[in-house]
Amino acid sequence: MNWEQLLSLKKQGDTSKRLRIEQDDTRLGFEVDYDRIIFSAAFRSLQDKTQVIPLSKTDFVHTRLTHSLEVSVVGRSLGRLVGKKIIEKYPYLKDIHGFHMNDFGAIVAAASLAHDIGNPPFGHSGEKAIGEYFSIGKGKKYQEYLSPKQWQDLIDFEGNANGFSVMTSSRPGIEGGLRISYATLGAFMKYPKESLPKKPTRNISDKKYGFFQADAAFFKEAAQDMGLIPNKSGEDIGFERHPLAYLVEAADDICYTIIDFEDGINLGLVSEDFALEYLIKLVKDSINTSKYKTLQTKEDRISYLRALAISSLINDAVKVFIANEEAILKGQFPFALMDKSKYKAQMDDIIKISIDKIYQSREVIEKELVGYQIIQTLLDKFITAYDNTFNGTASNYDKLILKLLPEKHHLEKENLYDRLLHICHYVSLLTDGNALELYETINGTKKR
């Protein structure tokens, strides 16, 4: 892979290259990507989607929106720091093509901003609820009518693949979705493969999948245009990662490790004394002890240590990336950057505590159980009504259900797989609150 190709400004539907040297620096294409994502309805819905505590009314707990904004800030720093080193190593990128270090920051910031844009309501349990509706629920009856890869898309419903679809899928009058540049899409794609074969290797890029069968043709086109390295044979589609995808992943890893832990402390799920023991290990080389001693509240002390910890992890991630840049360009780095961090043991310790004290807390479990019931009910009602309407067998109840479907989702889909995926896509874009309200309306339990 080479950086000139990887930094492609091309967008879906373009018939020729967009040259960086011809770009208007006041409205750079990579920055336009950021703007289009942040003004999209799918991104706005993240304000009422679970990060740690589903349906939490606590002010200081992060939602998917605040998490995404924070990941974007960390991603921008990672991108700029790496970009500075890359431009120094390959000066022709600036001298001939006009690239700047901030271009790397803009790409990683935009991709990081969008990294959760396809996640369903109620956190990762939302993905599992959709998958299990098909694998062991009422949706299992559709299996015989689908190809193995189409079926795998549904039973392993994946927020990353859904996010790619959100940003790229066309609908009448809206060609190419958000029309994001290929470079940003490449950086967004942590798992550049289809749903089958499942986990064919231990390569980090094979851990999950990154696009649905409905989006496979365009993904392949974009990957080839960027010069990503194919790593699957026969009819299977899979590529080595875009190098900047490692930075997006690192930004997410840093934020959920440290900031979810901070939420747990502020919620009282993790004691401050216990937490300090682990955070100090990350910041012992940079902490200003005298300043720390002046901080009067738990929130201020934790906030100070959080900022130092994130800074330490950013600098270390950049070192790991630059040390392995040539291997990454050759598609020979099958690890997450933070797996090679000198702080890996400390991060693993914090994640272990978060799993035990936060992610498996009673409040989280109770709300995830509610989420399962809500999502599977909505899927069943809307899929049944949508499919019956297509087949000409809709009941009056089905017609009433479809009147709850927003106008932009009233699309005719000839293919069963497309119909099923369309409803999954609709349900996935609901907020936690929207999903709950719709569930109560359908069940007749909504309070007037």
Image (cartoon, rainbow, N blue to C red):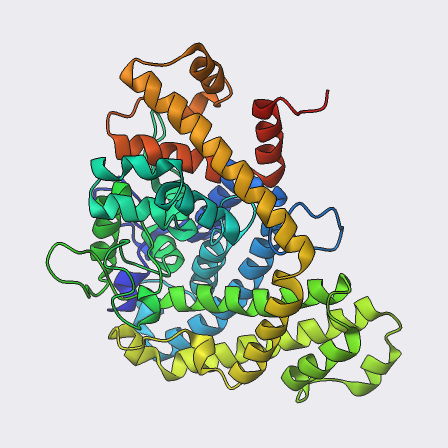
Q: Residue at x 49, y 73 (%)?
A: 81
Residue 41: x, y in percent?
52, 36
In-image side of 294 versus 265 (left or right): right
Residue 227: x, y in percent?
22, 62
Whether 407 is drawn above or below 195: the answer is above
Q: Residue at x 44, y 73 (%)?
A: 82
How many numbered tags mark residues here?
A: 0
Q: Which is nearer the eye, 146 or 223?
A: 146
Q: Which is nearer the eye, 304 or 1?
A: 304
In-image side of 428 versus 10 (left or right): right
Q: Is residue 104 visible?
A: yes
Q: Quadrant of the C terminus?
A: top right
Residue 67: x, y in percent?
60, 56
Q: Residue at x 70, y 48 (%)?
A: 56
Q: Which is nearer the eye, 151 or 63?
A: 151
In-image side of 22 versus 382 (left or right): left
Q: Quadrant of the N terminus?
A: bottom left
Q: Of all residues shown, which one is farthest toward the bottom?
A: 285
Whether 277 is drawn above or below 150: the answer is below
Residue 206 location, quadrant: bottom left
Q: Of all residues shown, which one is farthest toward the left?
A: 234
Q: Residue at x 10, y 58 (%)?
A: 234
Q: Of all residues shown, which one is farthest toward the top?
A: 396
Q: Is residue 39 visible?
A: no
Q: Which is nearer the eye, 205 or 353?
A: 353
Whether 265 is drawn above or below 179: the answer is below
Residue 3 location, quadrant: bottom left
Residue 371: x, y in percent?
57, 43
